[in-house]
Image: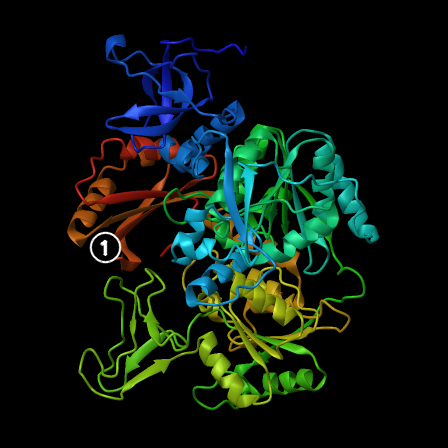
Amino acid sequence: MLSVEFPEDARVAVLTAQPLGRPFDYRAPEGGCSTGDFVEVPLGPRKVLGVVWGAGAGDVAAGKLRAVIRVLDAAPMREEMRAFLERAADYTLTPLPAMLRLATRAPGLGDPPSMRRLYRRGQGAPDRMTPARARVIELLEEYGGLAFTLGELAEQAGVSSSVVKGLIPSGAVLEEDAPRDRPYPHLDPALPGVPLAEDQAQAAARLRAGVAGGSYGTTLLKGVTGSGKTEVYLEAVAECLSHGRQALVLLPEIALTAEFLTRVERRFGARPAEWHSGVTMAERRRVWRMVGRGGAQLVVGARSALFLPFRDLGLIVVDEEHDSSYKQEEGVLYNARDMAVLRASLAGAQVVLASATPSLESWANAEAGKYARIDLTSRFGDAKLPEMRAIDMRTQDLPPSRWISPTLATAVEARMAAGQQSLLFLNRRGYAPVTVCRACGHQIGCDHCDARMVEHRFLKRLVCHQCGETKPIPATCPSCQAEGKLAPVGPGVERLAEESAERFPDARVAVLSSDLFTTARALKAQIKAIAAGEADIIIGTQLVAKGHNFPLLTLVGVIDADLGLQGSDLRAAERTFQLMRQVAGRAGRGADKGLALLQTFQPEHPVIRAILTGEEESFWQAEAAERRAAGVPPYGRMAGIVISAPEAKPAFDLGTWLARNDAPLRRIGAQLFGPAPAPIARVRGRHRVRLLIKADKGAPLQAAISDWLAPVKLPAQVRLAVDIDPQSFL
């Protein structure tokens, strides 16, 4: 019998995911419990999940303590994981219960082990197809063979359970009894990988050596687009698995998972565990429990996979580490790239940060010697890097409301004649960013936000990209009631697709924009069709810049290369450089050399020149010098404070009080700017006020902010969020 740390009736501290701020004391249950055990405890009239955090504090009389109800059948939370949650909470200034909530995002964790009945897609077809049956089959196919419980499948398909059961006799749906939470198929690291070029083999050997060492280290794997970074870091995964440790690969976009999972299956002979929003709840529970028990060797997931309870984590890969989607912008505000480094340092694991265009933070850490750095400078196989040129739009004869220049159009026609693909890139979703009345000048805005609504003509709706509110496109101006005077201003990808269809009538045009696909499966199907050559012209937003491989694509045309250079975002130059280089890298990944054409009104701009010349190190050095001189990240510290309320006055009153009582910040030499209305001053009906803190690199910023905010008692309906290392300033 296993010994327990706390015998029955001993005082224990239990942390729950409820917003209570700290652990609370309970009595250990019959049979006792130990630190890290997942338990069920009474909280008021409810029963909630918690984790034994250690010995009780003793601030409640023993006679008033309630008992832990039971210890759950789940692998205890390891000391490394508890330390990670505490350190992450301290760094992001997030209450510890909110961090625990991130680490327990799986349904049914308290359910006992048992057999369960699962339903998955079969090979058969129903003798009679109805709309309800079609929804069930479509849903099962969308999830690529994953199994559902009966209730989950019926609910998600919007049908009764009898509809699902009616599909079983024909074999269209398979019903099977399966043990809960089966281990994942074994991945064999001894299987041979693809043959590597010399520089790839050297890079893989260095990564393998780091993993074999069994200690913490971070490596920046910088390789030009198409250089085979994935195959290189999969060798590090193989080394990790061969030592019996677990690996985690983070991807920035769910649409990338299908192609990546296929590559993993080819390399290791089986599919890994998946963790992202497209996974069924039944599968999420299985992943969570198997990761904790060692029944999942490799997890491929979104940023939240960092909070899974790995038993022995040996490697974390952050693919496309520069991608802004790694920053969680709602709820708990954290950067998954930074949290990956923290988690690995506590677990004695290696981190690989892979990118063709690394973040300045990672570049600076490599320059300072904190991270190792490996460079892959040439494309894999016969593929060559694309040629890059600017199209000076000041010299182009372009009619009003048209955006494809004659020079770019000629290049597209040449590719079509050669049976090759062209990509027209514009980082604006929808049809037009602004709808204006030509009679009175009114611009249609969101009713709940201080933001213009974007016309989505394919959906026949106006959409707010801040809160998601939609409404029909009006026939008359909401302000002056004039009919037929509303006009779209500026281009979005839908308008660009319309122009392409007119300009190239024989072309097959495909649009890749996240809002045009209701399911992840539909998006993946479109990407697969494009890769198979079923489109001549691809119109895309930044979604297309994220690691996709289109072998027939030889021309990339950037419609508005100046778009990202506008505004006062301190990362504007960096993000523009990254995005342009990434999207240009989609061209020429097959046998034919690629060409990238950037339409710009300022070809002499330093960022545009750096993009065209490819002198990346010069760009990073210049960008680093500017940031260092300004004392901003990564050479200084910043924190954003956002106060929101249904009315503007309470938010400004609190912001003004904080500005007048900033002594804790001044003591560490920090500067406070604001309060001021946020650039988008109202979102979802709440008025927003921002303050910005700037401090030296070594300043104890979190401690000072904690002291500064300690006296604050938030009025009703007023919220305050702290964003350490902000990525967005909206």
**Residue picked out by circle 1:** 687
Residue in the foreground of this view, choosing between 396 and 525: 525
Colour convention of the picture? rainbow
* Residue 439 found in image quarter: bottom left
Residue in the foreground of this view, choosing between 679 and 300: 300
Tell me residue 159's x, y (percent): 39, 57
Residue 252 horizontal side relative to residue 223, left or right = left
Question: Image height check: is 387 above or below 104?
Answer: below
Residue 138 horizontal side relative to residue 474, left or right = right
Asked whether residue 580 is in view, the answer is no
Question: Image height check: is 566 above or below 718?
Answer: below
Residue 369 horizontal side relative to residue 493, left or right = right
Asked whether residue 130 is in view, the answer is yes
Q: Kindly identify the residue that appears in the image at 24 percent across and 78 percent down.
A: 442
The amino acid sitting under disc 1 is: His
Q: Kindly identify the residue that appears in the image at 35 percent across and 19 percent down.
A: 68
State which quarter of the image contains the C terminus.
bottom left
* Residue 696 found in image quarter: top left
State which quarter of the image contains the N terminus.
top right
Question: Image height check: is 728 above or below 716?
Answer: below
Tell me residue 12's x, y (percent): 37, 15
